[in-house]
Image: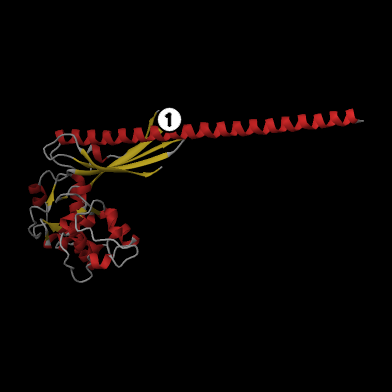
Amino acid sequence: MSSCRQQGAALILAILVVAIASTIAVFMAGQQSMWTEQAGNLLGRSQNNALAHAAIDWARGILAEDARNSRADHAGEAWAKPLAGLPVESANIGGAIHDQQALFNLNNLVNNGRDSEADIALFKRLLTQLQLPTDLVYPLLDWIDADSTVHAPGGAEDADYLLGEPPYRCANQALVSVDELYRVRGFNRANIERLKPFVTALSERTTINVNTAPREILSALLPDLAETDISTLLENRKAAFFNSKQDFRARLPQAAPALRDDAYDVTSNYFLADVMVRSSHADTAYEALLARPAVGGWPSIVWQRQLVE
């Protein structure tokens, strides 16, 4: 009887050992599968990043080539054509280059440390067209200018921002990115999203490219033109781009007022490249601000950032 019990106990122990061994084997197989998947994901992300950086360099090359062969920048050029779904290895690359001088440069509001009244008026006209409060210009001026004097009405300096939660100081320097508006008093998600398609933040004073500027920007630049005149101007531009500033002025309606010479041009030096790489492992998006030298040459990367992964 004792022998039977011992045999039974041995059998149970053997079954238990097999069960434990099977559990360990399943666990290790699961871990190995997870490690393999993680390694594949890391490799996929690394490949996506490399392809995204290569695409940004491709954009730089397109812009450099354009500078060698073109006297004006317009929507009919190669750089303005989006790249849609280019298959590369096991991924798919898409992207586009956007003219940043088609937009209003928010840093133009302050010129050599002083308020630029002409640009303030232009920005107010743009805000009015977008149905946004024109008083938004005043806290923005305080954020950009170097002094601590509060613009009225609605301006804000350190004393106002230090009362916030969390407290922080006024930048008192040029914007680096439009997203910085989220830190400026009076700006919220709704009005920033409304404004974003029409503004940029560039480190130097820039002109508006009348070949690529949207209707809203042209209307703010040319406030005395009727909307029908703006429509005619856009149609004429579509048929034949403006090849010089003189050409642009010559094709304005006879009653059009004189324009500031430093307010507009037909060329651009700043472009935003956005790139999306899709693969089975991940989607990776980058954007980069590119600065093309005025005398030609390879565009530099002012900044770049990864958006999603």
Residue sitting at 23 percent across and 55 percent down?
A: 215
Depth check: give the residue in front, 283 or 167: 167
- Please tell me how many numbered marks the rendered image carries: 1
Q: Residues within 10 Å of mark 1 (few under 14, many from 20)?
A: few
> Which residue shows up at 59% across the image and 34% down it?
30
Q: Nearer the viewer, residue 239 or 189?
A: 189
Residue 81 horizontal/vertical position (percent): 28, 39
Task: Specify whether 132 is left or right of 230.
Answer: right
On the image, numbered disc 1 is attached to which residue? 90
Q: Secondary structure at mark 1?
A: loop
56 or 81, nearer to the observer: 56
Q: Mark 1 belongs to which amino acid?
A: Ser
Going 10% across and 55% down the picture, which residue do you hit? 112
Residue 284 location (% of width, % of height): 39, 40
- Say left or right for 56 vs 6: left
Query: Does 251 sit above or below residue 71?
Result: below
Q: Say whether residue 296 is visible.
A: yes
Where is the N terminus found, in terms of image quarters?
A: top right
Q: Position of residue 19 (x, y in %)?
A: 72, 33
| Residue at 18% across, 59% down | 220
| Image coords of residue 181 (percent x, y) | 28, 58
Quadrant of the snapshot with the C terminus: top left
- Taking the image as drawn, is residue 136 in sight? no
Vertical placement of residue 89 versus 73, above or below:
above
Of all residues, the one furthest to the right in this rendering is: 1
